């Protein structure tokens, strides 16, 4: 670094600051754009920000269009900082590339290429039209932000985050099942922020029986309406109370009961009470087929799924190799008791060599508690995934898209290994 020219590094620092602002704008759209990615855009002329924007809900303007509208004539000769390559296609909205050219923008910095094969190619088109175009900076942060969209556009399935609160000795409840509360208010606020940023949230029937959660988003900043993700209850055997809070007809947002093998008369009674039911196939062991569930949620444009437990459901997702990210809230307190449940039930593994390894691990504090986050390597590499039947994979119609998606995701995770703001933009 000491060798770099001062004016070049000042320019790189300014570029990074504008892109970070664009990423902050994109973050405001998370959970509110499905099936589109949340994107942020900033227009800068002569060092002054002249327009800003982020993606509107699907069918509405893209981030660049919002920033161009805010800038008006000031966009002429400006540099556009955008967290995703501008689209080059006619989708629900016209191509951003044409609007950028029409407005006379001089330069474009994009933090990521578009994993959607239909919309990509925008940077190349802008470069061909004579604009000064480059990829970066902040590529790793942008890739993490786009991961749910990349997963969904590539495979038709959502990215799965496992979230749980546990004691320092790894328990998510006492031996009697009591769990309110393990963590403090700051950690619980973060958990609501996770719901606010998710397209769907999922719990098992056991959690509905034991905790009666509403699964709505509360306790988030009041500067905008909260996002209430689609609530999904996994229902295997047994019955559920019709009066459970999650089924209340006046809750904001929607609830879906996903079931394989629940008693038909009971399910019919829930349906009569207004609950939407998704009937799914069972796997070889008679349990609900999680891949069929992920396909069905993907078809409903769910790009990000937050699995909140309990231990049986989290264990099933881990055994199936279908956990992509983990957010663990760890309280510095001890519960003990051999019968007190751990975060992940299920079958588990025999040997430590089979343990699933987290990468990109971060540890933060939330009040007295710790927040440990990380990602799991590609799910199909999981030992539990090896035993799954071939027909539980994405259907042939999607196979090409899935392969493309896997290749693009691999590229994404490579770039996410780079430092968040390190290095300057790469010329296109
Ligand atoms: C952008 N800027 O802010 C977003 C983009 O159907 P449409 O017209 O809304 O296009 C959706 C596709 O556009 C989406 O699948 C993704 O490839 C891209 N998203 N592109 O230029 C944005 N959200
Ligand atoms: Zn666009």
Image (tube, rainbow, N blue to C red):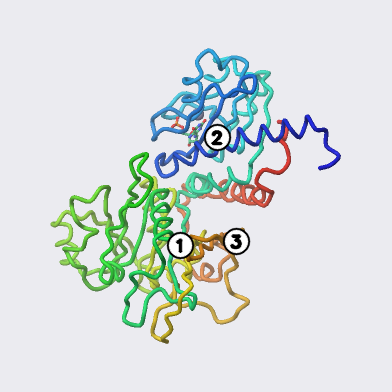
Residue 174 placement: quadrant = bottom left
Name the secondary structure under disc 2: helix
Disc 3 crowd rating (10 Å Cα; few below 14, some 14-19, many 20+) is: few
Identify which residue is drawn at 27% across, 50% down. 254
Q: Which disc is residue 162 wearing?
A: 1
Q: Going 41% across and 51% down the picture, which residue do you hit?
A: 193
Under 8 Å from ligand 1: the CB of mark 3? no
Q: Which mark is residue 361?
A: 3
Circle 1: element type: strand
Label placed on residue 288: none
Task: From the viewer's perspective, tell me whether residue 395 is left or right of residue 206.
Answer: right
Real-space CA distance between mark 3 and mark 2, rounded to the nearest whole angstrom: 25 Å
Whole-percent x, y for residue 344 in the image: 45, 73
Alpha-carbon span between mark 2 and mark 1: 28 Å
Task: Compare marks 3 and 2 and give the one earlier in the sequence.
Answer: 2
Which residue corresponds to the image point at 48% horizontal and 71% vertical from the top-left?
A: 319
Left or right of 67 in this view: 276: left
Q: In this figure, which residue is indicated by the disc labeled 2? A: 22
Front tag of 1 and 3:
3
> Looking at the image, which is closer to me, 136 or 167?
167
Q: Is residue 370 above or below residue 103?
A: below
Figure check: 161 above or below 133: below
Residue 134 falls in which quadrant of the image?
Answer: top right
Image position of 295 (left or right of 351): left
The quadrant in which residue 189 appears is bottom left
Identify the image quadrant of the C terminus: top right
Residue labelled 2 has its Cβ within 8 Å of some atom of ligand 1 = no
Label pair 1/3, CB-CB below 8 angstroms: no
Give how far across and how far down residue 266 sits, in percent: 17, 67
Marked residue nearer the N-terminal end (2 or 1): 2
Q: Residues within 10 Å of mark 2 (few under 14, many from 20)?
A: many
């Amino acid at each position: 670094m000491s060798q770099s020219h001062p004016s070049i590094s000042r320019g790189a620092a300014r570029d990074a600051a504008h892109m970070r602002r664009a990423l902050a704008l994109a973050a405001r759209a998370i959970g509110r754009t499905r099936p589109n990615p949340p994107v942020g855009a900033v227009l800068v002329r002569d060092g002054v920000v002249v327009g800003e924007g982020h993606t509107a809900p699907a069918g509405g303007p893209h981030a660049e269009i919002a920033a161009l509208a805010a800038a008006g004539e000031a966009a002429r000769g400006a540099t556009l900082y955008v967290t995703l390559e501008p689209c080059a296609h006619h989708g629900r909205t016209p191509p951003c590339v044409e609007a950028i050219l029409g407005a006379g923008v001089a330069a474009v910095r994009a933090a990521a290429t578009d994993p959607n094969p239909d919309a990509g190619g925008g940077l190349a088109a802008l470069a061909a039209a004579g604009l000064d175009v480059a990829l970066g900076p902040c590529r790793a942060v942008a890739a993490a932000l786009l991961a749910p969209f990349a997963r969904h556009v590539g495979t038709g399935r959502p990215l799965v985050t496992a979230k749980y609160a546990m004691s320092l000795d790894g328990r998510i409840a006492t031996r009697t099942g009591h769990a309110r509360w393990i963590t403090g208010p700051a950690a619980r606020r973060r958990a609501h922020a996770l719901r606010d940023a998710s397209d769907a949230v999922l719990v098992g029937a056991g959690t509905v029986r034991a905790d009666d959660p509403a699964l709505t988003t509360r306790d988030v900043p009041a500067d905008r309406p909260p996002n209430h993700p689609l609530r999904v209850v996994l229902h295997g055997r047994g019955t559920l109370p019709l009066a459970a809070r999650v089924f209340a007809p006046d809750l904001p947002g929607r609830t879906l009961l996903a079931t394989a093998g629940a008693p038909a008369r009971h399910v019919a009674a829930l349906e009569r009470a207004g609950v939407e039911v998704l009937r799914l196939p069972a796997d070889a062991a008679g349990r609900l087929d999680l891949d069929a569930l992920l396909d069905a949620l993907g078809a409903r444009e769910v790009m990000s799924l937050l699995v909140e437990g309990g231990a049986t459901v989290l264990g099933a997702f881990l055994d199936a190799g279908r956990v992509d990210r983990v957010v663990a809230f760890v309280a510095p307190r001890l519960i003990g008791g051999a019968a007190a449940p751990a975060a992940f039930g299920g079958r588990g593994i025999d040997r430590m060599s089979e343990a699933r390894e987290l990468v990109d691990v971060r540890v933060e504090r939330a009040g007295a508690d710790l927040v440990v986050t990380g990602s799991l390597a590609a799910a199909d590499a999981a030992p539990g995934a090896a035993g799954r039947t071939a027909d539980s994979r994405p259907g042939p119609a999607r196979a090409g898209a899935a392969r493309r998606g896997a290749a693009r995701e691999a590229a994404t995770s490579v770039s996410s290994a780079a430092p968040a703001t390190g290095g300057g933009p790469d010329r296109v």
